[in-house]
Image: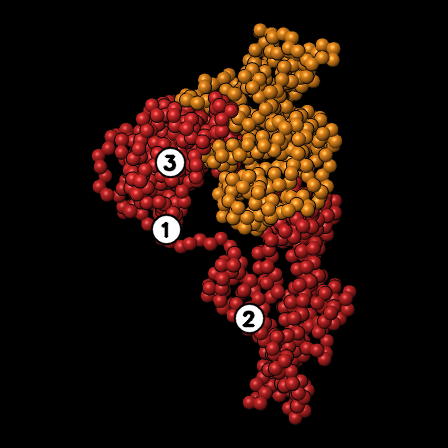
Amino acid sequence: MSELRFDDVTVRFGRGGRALTAVDGVDLTVPSGQVVGLVGESGSGKSTLARAAVGLAEPAGGQILLDGVPLRHRPGARRPLQMVFQDPYSSLDPRMTVGDSIAEAMPRGARRRDEVVRLLELVGLDADRVSAYPGALSGGQRQRVAIARAVAGQPDVLIADEITSALDVSIQGTVLNLVRTLQRELRLSMLFISHNLAVVRYVSDIVAVMYLGRIVEVGPARDVLGNPQHPYTKELLAAAPRRGSTALPPPDAVADAEPADPHHPPAGCRFHPRCPVGPLIRTDREHCLTLDPTTEADHRLHRAACHHAAGVLRAVGSNPPVLMELKEDSL
Amino acid sequence: MRTRWIAVLRTPVGAGAGLLLLGVLLLAVFAPVLWSHQANAIDTDHLLQGSSAQHWLGTDNLGRDIFYRVLVASRTSILLALLATAIAVVTGLALGSAPAILGKRGGRAAIAVVNIAVAFPGLLLALFFAVVFGVGAKGAVLAIGFAGAPSFARLTQTLVAGVAERDFIAAARIAGVGRFRMLVRHILPNIAEPLVVNATIGAGGTLLAFAGLSFIGLGVQPPAYDWGRMLGESLSGIYVHPAAALAPGVAVVIAGLAFNLFGEAVAKGLGVQVPRARWTSRTPEAVPARDSDAVLVVEDLQVSFPGPVTPVRGVSFTIRKGEIVGLVGESGSGKSLTALAVAQLIEPPGQVTAAELSFLGAPLLGRLPVRSTAATRRRLLGTSFAMVFQDPMTSFNPTKRIGVQLAEGAREHQGLSRRAAMNRAIDRLRAVRVPAAERRAHQYPHEFSGGMRQRAMIGMGLMGTPALIVADEPTTALDVTVQRQVLRLLETIRSEDDVAVLLISHDISVVAEICDRVLVMYAGRVVEDLPATELATGARHPYTRALLAAVPDLDTALDEPLAVIPGRPVDPARLPDGCAFAARCSFASDRCRTEDPVLVDQVACWHPQAQAEYSSFRTGQR
């Protein structure tokens, strides 16, 4: 039960001219006991953001706060953030039994044996798996062990980085059900990263969309998916499969554009080289080439980083922001 | 793991080397106890004599028996060599694993130290340390130990770096595991094997180096003696009685060989093991009449591996001109192996048999009687058959430009000139909508994004005039938005050039959108064959339905648990008697558990579901 807050976090790899800014000034809050789903394509920086939170990557700027206190990562100390990784085949030590792996993550002084058995049962594995090696388990079972290990650390916040994308569809459902049940039972705050919008929709209370190192839209899951503001969110929604669809959606105007190079992010709006409502299609929108839409994002619905987002908010005094107007012609 | 060590000792080389090493070590332990007296007995009557019945290998300048002295010297020689090896290993381990313990700055310093030390020749280091530590056994042990440390440190560093990349190390760090415990519990156990093997081989080298130092007088000092010193002392008399000089030399060779051979045998045994089997293929029987539209005909295809495991058990299907056929199933269902078998890419010891496997009317299986027809078949495959793999990162050669790689096939199979082939490559890149094709053709694969690389891969398939494109999970590694682009490209190619496509995927929603027909595979069989338009409503096999229900989409109910398929996929090595899906199926009856259903009327199930029962199934499953 804790709130995780990213405050203007920037993560950079390399130095000088060849530096790559994987995460660029991200503000994001994971409210206590809620699930924030983070979507975006590969290279958008969503995994880097997660790794920065757990101390596997060093932020070059900004702060990561847990309940308002900056996180510090000292080796050997208890970690209030735990993470479940994408690939269950590489995230478990092949030379360690399942029980040892789980016990290792426990805080000192815990009654380890009983606790390991309890955790195994919690994630739906037989207690006699304690002495099994990861090699004897299937992918889905390994991912359950990885989840048990993360929960064993008694985390305040759980980070799940693409935990189902290495699993078969038939297994994916059981792992998602497990994660959702655990999150509700333990009332965990959770950052759930996935490229699959349907999966994110299923587990998240809040959805954040990331593009080229920046959050371009964030808001309650139902609102963001029901009334997307940013053209990139719309593109993601259009690409997600729907039940019973037997034909590809018609191509949009800039369907074959190449994803931008994170080494050389475009000036102005980062999405403009691919944007279906941007300067590529509508030549009068030249300001997209030069003006950065993130600076004004707080005044827009879902904090959308788009000059042409429909919903605009205006703060009235110190009251919560209210929806002011909807521009008809802007999209 | 233990079984693999035992397996090493079962090979002839391993057993021989093991016995030899055991003998050498036993000798080192017991020889001084048994024969010290004989070795030190001074016989002034027989100084510097040749071999005789009394002294097999003659005597030295004090009349001591050389045979016994060689035996007794084994302890000093081997003990000192092992000590030096131990120093090299411990120092090397400490230096090599220092980066993991010290953190960023200290680690960088440790790496620099090792880098510099590795640059010096080992012998130079040994001589340098020998002078520093002084002449004598102790000095020589330290010298050789420290001289051997850099190469061991380098090896450790490389291995540690390899393991440190893996997720379980990151997971342990997040769990709050300290650096030292991390090294001992997580890193060392995972790199122990290559280290042990290298230490064993290193011991042989150390033995030799030590003999060398003693030989030039820097090692063991009198009255102690080892093989190197004995060799040095008797060298002056080598023309008078060679046995005295040769005996310690032979001892060094045998002991060194024992360590080296054992290390090599273990290294080989612990490496990748390939079971041996023969690659045979059944000659097709009489080819039945088929419709002329068929591009690919597969009849009763089986793929098996020694074990025996048969992951593909009698798959039959036909793909017609301009048709997109999807092949879906979970991992282990045999869908990729089916594709590889069609593409003739199953490597021995895998074995492919089929009643018929023909492409454009030409049989693909079986040895061809004439070499020229084999070449024809290769050309047919080279120009009319295209394969697209899952990971576009690894399917291009990273050191060659994209355009050159595309042109290669055209020059080989179509006999085009270099320029013509390059022009065609650029034209094809344009056809698969690679922007600025001319410039991109001169770029290397790493300069392409994943989606662009996948397009280039499809472009490569289009260099000829393909009749069939086999795409094995072509979009799995790509982002959703890019996925659509690649699928759309495949569809465009199909409609423009009438190319047939076999699309393999684990994602039934992808398949539903682009395919005309869908084959659902489970445990090496096609369990249902249905038009893609009927997937949503007309699926009759419980597995197809369960698979469809298990994929969450944007309309999935949020307040219910996701539908799942209970149990886990079957192990191809342990197939049940009846229907392979019976254990996971809620409709299974006794008949399902005993009788294996075959594909009748496009579905392999004893209880095919009617369309009306569909909705109840979806909500009834947990």
Chain ID of residue with mark 2: B
Q: Which residue is situated farthest in the bottom direction here?
A: B45
Marks 2 and 1, the one that precedes in the sequence: 2
Q: Residue at x 69, y 10 (%)?
A: A314
Viewport quadrant of the C terminus of chain B = top left
Q: Residue at x 68, y 46 (%)?
A: A109
Closer to us: mark 3 or mark 1? Answer: 3
Q: Amino acid at mark 2?
A: Leu
* Marks 3,1: beta carbons within 8 A: no
Query: Which of A66 and A9 lies nearest the eye of the viewer?
Result: A66
- Report the side of B165 relative to B299 (left or right): right
Chain in orange, by letter, is A
* Marks 3,2: beta carbons within 8 A: no
Chain in red, by letter, is B
Residue B308's mark? 1
Q: Amino acid at mark 1?
A: Pro
Residue B585's mark? 3
Mark 2 vs mark 1: same chain? yes
Query: Which of B422 and B46 lies nearest the eye of the viewer?
Result: B46
The kind of secondary structure element at disc 2 is: helix
Closer to us: mark 3 or mark 2? Answer: 3
Q: Residues within 10 Å of mark 3 (few under 14, many from 20)?
A: some
Q: Amino acid at mark 3?
A: Cys
Q: Residue B260, can we see it?
A: yes
Marks 3 and 1, the one that precedes in the sequence: 1
Q: Which quarter of the picture shows residue A214?
A: top right
Q: Residue at x 55, y 32 (%)?
A: A181
